[in-house]
Image (cartoon, coloured by chain):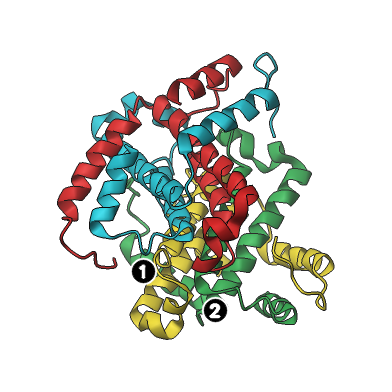
Chain colours: A green, B yellow, C red, D cyan
Amino acid sequence: MKTLVQKFMEARKWEQGHTPKNLAMSIAIEAAELMEHFQWGDREDFTAEKLGPEKIDEIRLEAADVMIYMLSFCRSLGIDLAEAVQDKMEKNEIRFPADVERKAD
Amino acid sequence: MKTLVQKFMEARKWEQGHTPKNLAMSIAIEAAELMEHFQWGDREDFTAEKLGPEKIDEIRLEAADVMIYMLSFCRSLGIDLAEAVQDKMEKNEIRFPADVERKAD
Amino acid sequence: MKTLVQKFMEARKWEQGHTPKNLAMSIAIEAAELMEHFQWGDREDFTAEKLGPEKIDEIRLEAADVMIYMLSFCRSLGIDLAEAVQDKMEKNEIRFPADVERKAD
Amino acid sequence: MKTLVQKFMEARKWEQGHTPKNLAMSIAIEAAELMEHFQWGDREDFTAEKLGPEKIDEIRLEAADVMIYMLSFCRSLGIDLAEAVQDKMEKNEIRFPADVERKAD
């Protein structure tokens, strides 16, 4: 999906305003829009069943917006996101060994 | 990277508190931490060169945090993120044709 | 303005869903909507003059939304916001003495 | 509390980096830090009693941080926040009459 997003941006010359700072803001803005679907109500209201296919579809397109800006952001700074996730998971493996209960922090 | 994150979560039984609502919050929280690196300063301060390798490394691990929660969130609702991005990009292709200048919105 | 917001909420029985958790989410969501006005563009694009009275009016109503949820949030936990600001400013006075230049952090 | 925050900023010459754009980001960042206290757990975990005085104190200082940036932001654009809240509440009175049940939006 990385190449797809990149080509789209280049074709539209959207890259000029797409500074790392502005893209980091955009990720946060889209993340808030995603969260808005869960603003009111409790855990039991937000299962895939309760939400239903239409709402789920809205949510997945919001998730896509976060992801699209994530890819643009990473590209703007030359970050390999898949590699970053791998590295972070390795750090997490050490920080939170699998056989230890997680404490609230 | 999807499988990696999933196995990690399962091994730690972290999935209980990981409701769609809480994970949507987590994405927003991590997105804000990512944005924090760009809080002060302007466009010219945030190039890969100016930031330097150490700062870039911090930033990529923050980006990984956003991504890890994105994957957990999508999993919690059965969302295929790559497919969602593809679908959204197709909608964007129609909404913003490539040969038209983007207007500020 | 505290009493105004409180009466409004009570008259509508909105307080039920207005748990501290949901209100904290609401503050973050409204804060992102406020930030959205500044998503693209640089420092020089966002002076009161460049924005113009209409845009400023939109922005002030978004700021009001953040504030309304802030007041509801503080009320839900019995927090006196004015007192909290005073206490925090006193801590800041000690942490950042007035005659010392601020370092980026 | 407005004057208090203003004097503090002036004494430290913090106003330079404090553009409306950066301050809008700061509000969102602090709002996320506030929200972080409610990231895991449900409605019943976040009463004033369950949280306890120490946690409440942390939360009120985070709320103060949001508020301090709100005041700086409003000042940077010449917005009277109390007036904005009053105006917004009047709009809300019309939009959501007191005797009508709220519909999910």
Q: Amino acid at mark 1?
A: Lys
Name the residue rendered at 16%, 63% in the picture: C100
- In this picture, residue C84 sits left or right of residue B59: left
| Residue occupied by mark 1 | A91
Chain to which the residue tagged by mark 2 belongs:
A
Query: In the image shown, does B51 or C89 lie closer to the viewer?
Result: C89
Up-down relation of residue B76 to residue B84 (above or below): above
Up-down relation of residue D5 to residue B58 (above or below): above
Up-down relation of residue D62 to residue B83 (above or below): above
Q: Is residue A35 visible?
A: no
Q: Which type of secondary structure does the marked residue at label 1 adopt?
A: helix
Is disc 1 in the same subunit as disc 2? Answer: yes
Seen as rendered, the residue at the extreme bottom is B49
Q: Which mark is residue B98?
A: none
| Residue occupied by mark 2 | A76
Name the residue rendered at 77%, 64% in the picture: B87
Q: Looking at the picture, how far across and down is residue B70, in whole percent?
A: 56, 59
Name the residue rendered at 28%, 60% in the picture: D13
Chain to which the residue tagged by mark 1 belongs:
A
Sequence-earlier tag: 1 or 2: 2
Q: Looking at the picture, how far across and down is residue B20, in whole percent?
A: 57, 46
Image quadrant where one finds the N terminus of chain C: top left
Q: Amino acid at mark 2?
A: Ser
Of labels 1 and 2, the one closer to you: 2
Q: Looking at the picture, how far across and down is residue C102, in whole percent?
A: 24, 64
Q: Looking at the picture, how far across and down is residue D38, in whole percent?
A: 42, 40
